[in-house]
Amino acid sequence: MKSRKFKFQDGRGGSALALRVTPRSRKNEVTQFLSDGTVNVKLTAPPINGKVNIALIKLLAKNLKVKQSEIEIIAGKKGRNKLVSIYGLDSETVHRRISGLITKSK
């Protein structure tokens, strides 16, 4: 996997983050920050007919405390590496909430 330099980014209406998704896992969880700053997410959904993307949006919306409509996969809809935009939250808030999820899962 190529090293990516972005982590959490502020945008006009919110922030963006890089994710690495593992489908067909035992449970839905945000597990860790990878060495390149990407957030690793495990999902129970299979990578068929967009089910992983739906599960990812539901998981992020619930845990980041935003509406599902405020989350958009802007790159990587068919791959494991995704870039997700979160409208209405700045990068500092997203980082803090993601970090809290990782701490809880350990």
Image (tube, grey):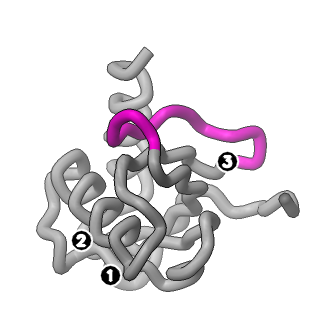
Query: Mark 1 or mark 3, which has the lower sequence index?
Result: 1
Seen in the picture, residue 72 relative to 89 is either above or below; the reply is below
Rendered location of residue 73, percent (x, y): 43, 79
Name the residue beneath numbered marker 2: 88
Name the residue beneath numbered marker 1: 13
| Magenta region includes residue 29 | yes
Q: Is residue 57 left or right of residue 41?
A: left
| Magenta region includes residue 10 | no
Task: Inspect the image, locate mark 3, and give the three-letter code of the amino acid beneath it.
Answer: Gly
In which quadrant is the C terminus drawn?
top left
Measure the C-alpha gap from mark 2 to mark 1.
6 Å
Q: What element carries label 3?
A: loop
Seen in the picture, residue 1 relative to 41 is either above or below; the reply is below
The answer to whether residue 96 is visible is no
Which mark, by number, is residue 37? Answer: 3
Residue range (magenta): 25-37
Are circles 2 and 1 on residues that touch, CB within 8 Å? yes
